[in-house]
Image (cartoon, helix red, strand yellow):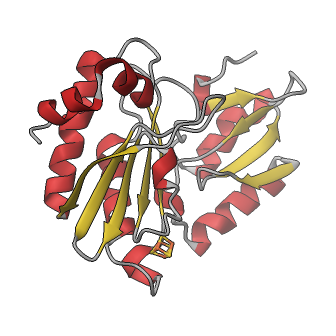
Amino acid sequence: MLNDGEKGVVLQRDQETYGIAPHIPCGLVTAETLRKIAEVAERYQIPQIKITSAARIALLGIKEEDVDRVWADLGMDPGNVVGICVRSIKACPGTTYCKRGQQDSLGMGMTLDSRFHGMQLPGKLKFGVSGCPNQCGETSFKDIGLVGTVKGWRVYVGGNGGTTPRIGEVLVQRIDSQEALSIIDRIIEYYQNNAKPKERMGKMIERLGLTALEEAVGL
Ligand code: SF4
């Protein structure tokens, strides 16, 4: 039997089969990739394909003996669905497609994904990037969230869902993309150096105070 995370699998409720979720940065997928996923699902008689809340495409009910061949045939990397690391970067269409967009949330999301996806940290960490204050990227519920406004990015910290949901707080606003990325680097560094094992960003802020984080990132 495989452990959760081993070979990118999660054991399913039946205690026999596995689910996998290939890494699909910001949920952007091509027709070719969709075709490949469909072909693999048919080839290995995978009973369920599910679009997840993290904008991934999960294949559920895979037999253990098929796991290696499924990954080989897909030719894709596993998404970080479990583990103490940067899990998912959720980004809305922003100025690329949405008429309400005020900042390039997809571009920012893809940059964050390439820099941070899978990075090992004290606790799990999720990003949300929204191109305008409508927050379709669920920014306020993410450990680090960005909202686009006409004057630049607004950065939220400390949001999460789970059993004790928390709304993030505004750390800084009206900054451009380079400044936002620089501040996110410093937030991550502070979190790496100060969070207790498995402590989410919001809990760390409650323990140490938002002012300490503001000072650490140079605000
Ligand atoms: S958050 Fe704004 S820009 Fe993004 S999809 Fe929603 S309405 Fe469009």
Write the residue at 37% across / 79% down. Answer: 95
| Res. 29 image quadrant | bottom right
Q: Where is residue 126 in the image (x, y as percent from the top left)?
A: 46, 41
> Disc count in the image?
0
Q: Where is residue 4 in the image (x, y as percent from the top left)?
A: 65, 22
From the viewer's side, name the closer residue of 43 and 217.
Answer: 217
From the viewer's side, name the closer residue of 211 and 191.
Answer: 211
Write the residue at 70% across / 48% down. Answer: 58
User: Please, is residue 200 above or below residue 79 in the view?
Assistant: above
From the viewer's side, name the closer residue of 12 and 72.
Answer: 12
User: Please, is residue 36 above or below residue 17 in the view?
Assistant: below
Q: The N terminus appears in which quarter of the rendering?
A: top right
| Res. 201 image quadrant | top left
- Is residue 85 among what the camera can see? no
User: Please, is residue 91 above or below residue 20 in the view?
Assistant: below
Write the residue at 20% across / 26% down. Answer: 212
> Is 92 placed left or right of 96 in the picture?
right
- Is residue 4 among what the camera can see? yes
Q: The C terminus appears in which quarter of the rendering?
A: top left
Q: Residue furthest top?
A: 197
Write the residue at 44% across / 23% down. Answer: 203
Q: Which residue lies furthest to the bottom in this view?
A: 99
